[in-house]
Image (spheres, grey):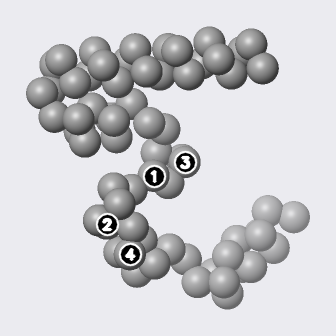
Amino acid sequence: VKELMVFLDIAVFEIILAYLEKRDWKEAFFSVLPQRKGAVPLGEANDLSKHAPSEKEDEDNDSDNN
């Protein structure tokens, strides 16, 4: 739990620094947040389904990794 709190403290600090640099909260947040988490702005959340792999593609990818 302590490691998570340190990570969150660092992430918040990095977001604030990015905001001071970019002067845009959205840009700052998404430049710091790891892309692998798949975060998207709330207004763009519906567009995610257009870019997400279908269940069939997901199954194909899973079988390739075994």
Which residue is found at the position 29% from the left and 65% from the top? 43
- Which of discs 2 and 3 lies nearer the camera? The answer is 2
Q: Earlier in the sequence, mark 1 or mark 2?
A: 1
> Rounded to the nearest whole Å, what is the CA distance between mark 3 and mark 4?
16 Å
- What SS does tag 2 mark? helix
Which residue is found at the position 38% from the left and 18% from the top? 14
- What SS does tag 4 mark? helix
Reading the image, the residue beneath label 4 is: 46
Three-letter amino acid code at the position of disc 3: Lys
Relative depth, front residue between 8 and 56: 8
Reading the image, the residue beneath label 1 is: 39
Q: Are marks 2 and 4 in contact (CB under 8 Å)?
A: yes
Reading the image, the residue beneath label 3 is: 37
Three-letter amino acid code at the position of disc 4: Asn
Image coordinates for residue 48, horizontal then vertical, percent: 42, 71
Question: Which label number is shown at residue 44?
Answer: 2
> Rounded to the nearest whole Å, what is the CA distance between mark 1 and mark 2?
10 Å
